[in-house]
Image (cartoon, rainbow, N blue to C red):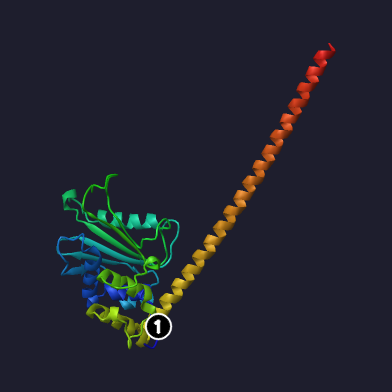
Amino acid sequence: MQHAIDPKIDCVFKALLGSDENRNLLIHFLNAFLAQELTEPLVWVDILNPYNDKEFLSDKLSIVDVKAKDRHEQLYQIEIQLTSYGHLSSRIIYNWADIYSQQLKSGQDYGQLRPTYSIWLLAENLLAEDNDYAHHYKMRDDQGRAFNRHGGIWLLELNKFDASRIETEDQRWLKFFKDGEQLNDTALPDWMSTQEMKQAMNTLTTFSEKEQQYYQYQARQEYLREQRSIQLELEQTNRALLQERLEKEAAQRSEMLALQEKQAALIEVEQLKAQLAAKNH
């Protein structure tokens, strides 16, 4: 390839899984990760927010997740997230709840709600408490019993994925998104030998070889770098402000403690004076 292309950059990700010409890749991706959840493999989905390259060239705030609906009206959301931050988990839950709740229109009842499946590919670690790269969240009680079976949230942390052998289709997709930027379309490794992976690689090649698509890729990459820099600066500023506040509060506590000690000493002196005066009488 003429240029290395990272499949995690949002315009590439959206072209891979959110374009009409790659609809079969979206179906394959969903079946790979949701095989244990679905009553039958998906054979068709309707892409609700299809990829449009002109939108990405002209609008830096383009919707970059992929939303789809199957023939049973079940909903699917896939999103790539390059950076992690404090309120990301809240955003993930809110997005799932928003998609789930928006199903009902005026006059419709709760029985018309359908399962909603949300899959997040995370380039940076979100969960520090363990080393598992895949996490499935569903509504259950403390004994693991499902409250309902209306989908859930799947978090896939790419940094933690480190399979020595690629044995399943979901592992193939994770490997592709994690290491895709290092791939060479003229010498693909064995795990990229399937029809779906070759088709995915063709999408990367298109971004690499065609001038307009590569310009689009560069523009999005630069925009994401700028956003990341702004986020880092804000985090540094917030940390500095927090440290300043903590130091100020610590100084105030020290001053208060010193004042209390001084007041206690004065009270003790007055008590001693009173005791001496009583003895003299």
Please indicate, yes or no, whether residue 109 appears anywhere in the rendered image: no
Please indicate, yes or no, whether residue 40 appears anywhere in the rendered image: yes
Residue 193 placement: quadrant: bottom left
* Front one among 103 and 235: 235
Q: Is residue 32 above or below residue 199?
A: above
Q: Is residue 29 above or below residue 194?
A: above
Q: In this view, does 16 lie to the left or right of 124?
A: left
Q: Where is residue 266 shown, x and y percent of the image?
A: 76, 29
Instruction: For the C terminus, give its image quadrant.
Output: top right
Residue 91 placement: quadrant: bottom left
Q: In this view, does 255 lie to the left or right of 24?
A: right
Q: In this view, does 225 lie to the left or right of 261?
A: left
Residue shown at 15% from the left, 60% from the top:
39
Secondary element at image label 1: loop
- Residue identified by numbered label 1: 4
Of the residues shown, which amino acid type is indicated by label 1?
Ala
* Front one among 178 and 66: 178
Q: In the displayed image of the protein, which residue is found farthest to the front?
A: 164
* Front one among 192 and 207: 192
Q: In this view, does 185 lie above or below 97?
A: below
Instruction: For the N terminus, give its image quadrant.
Output: bottom left
Q: Where is residue 63 shown, x and y percent of the image?
A: 34, 68
Residue 34 placement: quadrant: bottom left
Q: Where is residue 180 shown, x and y percent of the image?
A: 36, 77
Residue shown at 31% from the left, 73% from the top:
165
Q: In the displayed image of the protein, which residue is found farthest to the right?
A: 280
Mark 1: few/some/many CA within 10 Å (<14, 14-19, 20+): some
Q: Is residue 191 above or below residue 245?
A: below
Q: Where is residue 124 shown, x and y percent of the image?
A: 42, 65
Q: In the displayed image of the protein, which residue is found farthest to the top?
A: 281
